[in-house]
């Protein structure tokens, strides 16, 4: 979902179920007007060149002609056709993508970027943000082998070329862990990263009798539910409550991450356990008020 500078909100892709066939196609985008509360479906042209997808990164970019575009990266594909920018995940029979595509908010016509340069491996649940006039930054995501990524990549939207991976400076700062579904936004020349989580399926015998519902447990600045559930598997996840920042002015050189301290607005004291972590967080920075707004679905507090 993207809140556009034209005052409208756009939603593209997603899924109606857990099977690869349940991924929505690429032939339309939903357009919502918050003022009139009207929801419209816009037909996208040349959709045959772009796979339908879910779990993709999505941003708005304004080009030098002041034309607005919705840009998508990666995700889990609807199509099972072979592609140089995709890889099969045999454990879930899905196809992960690493392509970049965009459509104009004036013509609603798809453009497959056919990007050049060494780029990130196929992934889903990565997050993206726009820096400056034409740089898209991509962080994290879930890879085909089921592991999360801690990579930060930069992409030139004008040249349609990957600039490369941004190596963290491990001798300075405090780099974030490998994360999926984190919140990513730009504040001036700084990239801000908040939240996100790791998930693993652990095979266990079916419990008898069924245990009580999982309870949240604190793990420093990370927290998640204790093991529990029924059937032959347990979903174990850890949520991050940490906020990181990186100075973008040195790109594409090594980046120095900074672990930011969250404080209470009223007292200035450390926020501690009072702020939330959650699944699929998103963030937006407002330059006029100098405020970072974070939204989380499925949030939890200790």
Image (cartoon, rainbow, N blue to C red):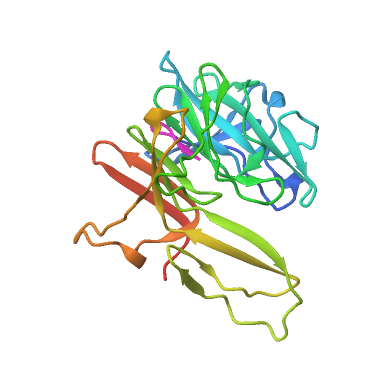
**148 lies above or below 240:** above
Quadrant assignment for the C terminus: bottom left
Decide if residue 233 is in sight here.
Answer: yes
- Pick the front one: 291 or 120: 120
Q: Identify the residue at image location x=49%, y=29%.
A: 136
* Residue sitting at x 58%, y 37%: 12
Q: Nearer the viewer, residue 60 or 222?
A: 222
Q: Which residues are the magenta region?
A: 1-8
**Position of 88 compared to 225: left or right?**
right
Residue 188, located in which quarter of the rendered image? top left
Q: Position of residue 179 (x, y in %)?
A: 54, 50
Residue most extreme to the top:
65
Q: How many marks?
A: 0
Q: Is residue 7 magenta?
A: yes
| Residue 36 in view of the camera | no
Instruction: Name the residue furthest front.
Output: 171
Which residue is farthest left? 267
Taking depth in this image into account, of 265 and 42 the one nearest to the observer is: 265
Q: In the picture, residue 124 is in which quadrant?
A: top right
Q: Height in image: 227 above or below 284?
A: below
Measured as percent of width and height from the top left, residue 98 is found at 65, 33
Q: Is residue 102 magenta?
A: no
The answer to whether residue 88 is above or below residue 232 is: above
Q: What percent of the width, then of the height, locates residue 153?
A: 54, 33
Where is residue 236? Give x, y as percent: 61, 66
The residue depicted at 44 percent of the width and 60 percent of the height is 277
Which residue, as the protein is rendered here, is positioned at the far bottom? 209
Residue 210 quadrant = bottom right
The residue closer to the viewer here, 15 or 277, is 277
Q: Majority secondary structure of the magenta segment?
A: loop
161 to the left or right of 129: right
């Amino acid at each position: 979902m993207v809140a556009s500078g034209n005052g409208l909100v756009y939603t593209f892709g997603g899924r109606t179920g857990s099977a690869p066939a349940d991924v929505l196609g690429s032939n339309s985008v939903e357009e919502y007007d918050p003022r009139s509360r009207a929801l419209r479906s816009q037909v996208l042209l040349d959709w045959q060149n772009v796979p339908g997808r879910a779990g993709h990164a999505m941003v708005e970019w304004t080009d030098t002609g002041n034309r607005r575009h919705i840009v998508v990266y990666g995700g889990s594909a609807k199509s099972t056709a072979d592609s140089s920018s995709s890889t099969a995940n045999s454990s879930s029979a899905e196809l992960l993508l690493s392509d970049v595509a965009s459509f104009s908010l004036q013509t609603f016509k798809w453009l497959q970027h056919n990007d050049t340069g060494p780029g990130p491996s196929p992934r889903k649940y990565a997050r993206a943000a726009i820096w400056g006039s034409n740089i898209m930054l991509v962080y994290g995501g879930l890879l085909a082998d089921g592991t999360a990524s801690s990579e930060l990549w930069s992409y030139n939207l004008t040249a349609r070329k990957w600039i490369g991976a941004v190596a963290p400076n491990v001798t300075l700062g405090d780099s974030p862990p490998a994360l999926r579904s984190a919140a990513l936004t730009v504040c001036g020349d700084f990239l801000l990263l908040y939240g996100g989580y790791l998930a693993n399926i652990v095979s266990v015998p079916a419990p008898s009798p069924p245990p009580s519902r999982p309870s949240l447990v604190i793990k420093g600045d990370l927290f998640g539910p204790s093991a529990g559930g029924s059937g032959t598997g347990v979903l174990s996840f850890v949520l991050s409550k940490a906020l990181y920042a990186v100075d973008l002015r040195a790109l594409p050189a090594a980046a120095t991450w900074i672990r930011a301290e969250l404080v209470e607005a009223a007292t200035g004291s450390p926020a501690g356990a009072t702020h939330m972590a959650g699944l699929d967080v998103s963030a937006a920075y407002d330059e006029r008020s100098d405020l970072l707004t974070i939204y989380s679905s499925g949030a939890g507090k200790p």
